[in-house]
Amino acid sequence: MRAVVQRVERARITVAGEPVGEMGAGLLALVGVARSDGPEAAATLGRKLVHLRILPDAEERMNASLLETGGTLGVVSQFTLLGDARRGRRPSWTEAAAPDHAEPLVEAVCAAARTFGVTVISGRFGAHMAVELVNTGPVTILLDTERRF
């Protein structure tokens, strides 16, 4: 699984102009699922997201996690993170999981985070979403459960 994680002041997810999720300070993760991913990758990513120490502590240093700050985690599925644009001008999506495989794994990431007591909001899987966010810092981190980067 891959994730683009942004530290946010606030974020909002809408579908067809209707809000489906809103949050204050925390982390917003755009999550892509590969065909080879399974429940273990989802649990690993959920655990990593809640423990990731990129939020400001009392001295404004990037040293705190969602667990320490009480921040919210936003999760938005994004198959395009598995796009391979190394050849040609149009990305290949062959590594991205099919929706019936990906949707339960995105939900499993959310469930794993919730087991730690973190508030989680999410988009609507498979929908055309608008994601508005205020990235604070700015801070953006790339995660990959296969540790490719």
Image (cartoon, grey):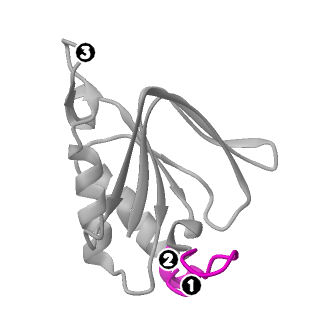
> How many angstroms separate mark 3 from mark 2 (CA)?
36 Å
Left/right placement of residue 36 relative to residue 83 reads left
Label the magenta part by its dominant secondary structure: loop
Q: Seen from this angle, which residue lies furthest top?
A: 59
Image spot of residue 47 (x, y percent): 23, 55
Tell me whether circle 3 and circle 2 mark residues in contact (CB < 8 Å). no
**Residue 148 rendering spot, x and y as whole percentages:** 29, 70
Q: Are marks 2 and 1 in contact (CB under 8 Å)?
A: yes
- Taking the spot 33% from the left edge, 81% from the top edge, the residue there is 38
Of circles 3 and 2, which is in front?
Answer: 3
Residue 98 shows which numbered tag?
1
Q: Position of residue 138 (x, y in %)?
A: 44, 29
Where is 42 relative to 95, above or below? above
Q: Is residue 88 magenta?
A: yes
Quadrant of res 112 = bottom left
Is 114 left or right of 72, judged from the image as shown? left
The residues tagged by marks 2 and 1 sit, at their Cα atoms, a distance apart of: 6 Å
